[in-house]
């Protein structure tokens, strides 16, 4: 089985040339002091994992950098993504880049962790034997041991940020129990495991002490939070505790699964001023038949009713969603249903993915019967529609005063990505 598109080493020539051009011309073989460079690919959840690894390694006295632009690390740890084909290819290319660097003596050891490694470790070991060791998504202790470090329990709740300190991702759970037909995340991340409220509050307090003003709550499925620990959906209680943390001005909720959405979350969102009136809720399609094929456990009618409830309970809320175009069985008529769904729902933000045929998922048993060019054309049509909607919604804000969190200054302009 070929697990990724053809990737001859010539594809990595640009990386090899980059390394040669930027090298300090120092061969690290035989160097006495260990320095680790962590390279992160994929989503914000992977970034949090890398930050935890960074914190643990530095806590063990090991010099560690995140995505260093210098070629002075003798060990590289690549935290991979295995979500869809493009992400897999990027991970493979990055691994090969550092394997070439190892062959040239620029680095001594290359270790690979994360989702791609979790999912395809056996195949990857055969195809890229020059990698020194492979680790899964829950192998932190084993990875630390490989790096001559111990897991320090006293660092639980501590995290060194790799992004500007005014915002931070807070991962509230790991894994997913949902049966979505197209998704391989449970294969890579395992079953849902919630982090205890007290541990998350401690982490939030530590981040606030470092200057964090905005927490972005992330999980594979944030609305499932607490079912394993507290035997109930407990996201509302978690939000209330986090909102009490002194110094945290904004809390933003991501990746809320629509089926079984805990409506008490909306009451907390409406009543607590530092919880943003914002919701990232992946809906994936606007056709009931396609939602059934996708095993989403809902219908278009139920989805629209939920969106209406959200907007009624939280006045002025901004809603972001993601959709998939070209899932097996999607007809032109069902795509038009999705276009109509977007037109009538008027999302503030929208992302669209072309369907990726992921092995060992339920959808993989279906014929991938929508051609790639048709998938991309449908993605483009949806995004063109959304651009017009976003423009209209943004024009309504002209002349209004809003509280914003400045991300950066470029020249004479101040730029921000977030607002209440």
Image (spheres, rainbow, N blue to C red):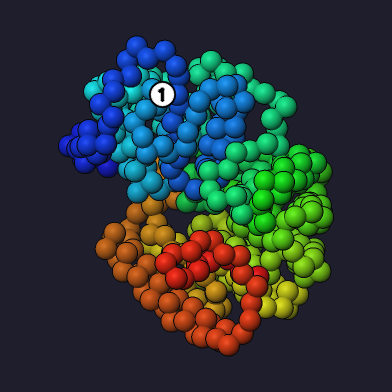
Is disc 1 surrounded by few (<14), some (14 to 19) or many (20+) residues within 10 Å? many
Q: Nearer the viewer, residue 159 or 284?
A: 159
Q: Which one is in front, 387 or 371?
A: 387
Residue at 66%, 60% in the rendered image: 252
Q: Is residue 217 visible?
A: no
**Quadrant of residue 151 within the rendered picture:** top right
Q: Residue furthest left?
A: 10
Mark 1 residue element: strand
Q: Residue at x 71, y 25 (%)?
A: 153
Q: Position of residue 121 (x, y in %)?
A: 42, 27
Say above or below: 290 vs 157. below
**Residue on which the image places disc 1:** 75
Quarter of the image with the N terminus in it: top left
Q: Residue at x 71, y 37 (%)?
A: 157
Q: Is residue 25 left or right of residue 170?
A: left
* The quadrant where residue 399 appears: bottom right
Residue 413: where, in percent of width, then height?
A: 46, 71
């Amino acid at each position: 089985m070929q697990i990724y598109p053809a990737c001859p080493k010539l594809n990595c020539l640009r990386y090899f040339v980059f390394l040669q051009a930027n090298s300090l011309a120092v061969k690290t073989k035989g160097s006495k002091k260990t320095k680790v460079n962590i390279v992160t690919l994929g989503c914000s959840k992977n970034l949090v994992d890398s930050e935890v690894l960074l914190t643990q390694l530095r806590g063990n006295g090991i010099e560690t950098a995140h995505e260093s632009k210098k070629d002075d690390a003798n060990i590289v740890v690549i935290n991979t993504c295995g979500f869809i084909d493009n992400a897999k290819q990027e991970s493979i290319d990055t691994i090969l880049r550092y394997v070439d660097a190892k062959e040239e003596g620029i680095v001594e050891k290359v270790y690979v962790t994360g989702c791609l490694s979790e999912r395809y470790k056996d195949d990857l070991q055969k195809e890229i034997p020059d990698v020194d060791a492979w680790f899964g998504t829950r192998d932190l202790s084993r990875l630390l041991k490989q790096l001559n470090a111990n897991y320090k329990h006293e660092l639980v709740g501590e995290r060194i940020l790799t992004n500007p300190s005014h915002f931070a991702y807070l991962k509230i759970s790991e894994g997913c129990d949902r049966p979505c037909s197209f998704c391989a995340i449970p294969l890579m991340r395992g079953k849902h495991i919630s982090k205890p409220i007290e541990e998350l509050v401690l982490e939030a307090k530590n981040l606030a002490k470092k200057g964090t003003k905005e927490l972005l709550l992330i999980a594979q499925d944030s609305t499932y939070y607490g079912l394993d620990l507290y035997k109930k959906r407990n996201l509302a209680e978690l939000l209330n505790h986090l909102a009490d943390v002194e110094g945290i001005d904004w809390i933003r909720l991501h990746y809320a699964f629509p089926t079984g959405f805990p409506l008490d979350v909306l009451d907390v969102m409406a009543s607590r001023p530092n919880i943003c009136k914002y919701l990232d809720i992946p809906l994936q399609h606007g056709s009931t038949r396609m939602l059934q094929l996708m095993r989403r456990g809902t219908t278009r009618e139920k989805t629209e009713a939920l969106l209406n409830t959200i907007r009624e309970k939280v006045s002025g809320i901004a809603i972001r969603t993601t959709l998939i175009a070209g899932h097996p069985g999607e007809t032109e008529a069902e795509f038009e249903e999705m276009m109509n769904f977007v037109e009538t729902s008027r999302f503030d933000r929208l992302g669209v993915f072309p369907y990726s045929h992921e092995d060992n998922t339920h959808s993989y048993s279906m014929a991938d019967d929508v051609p790639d060019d048709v998938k991309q054309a449908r993605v483009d049509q949806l995004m063109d529609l959304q651009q017009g909607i976003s423009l209209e919604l943004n024009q309504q804000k002209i002349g209004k005063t809003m509280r914003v969190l400045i991300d950066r200054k470029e020249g004479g302009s101040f730029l921000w990505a977030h607002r209440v």
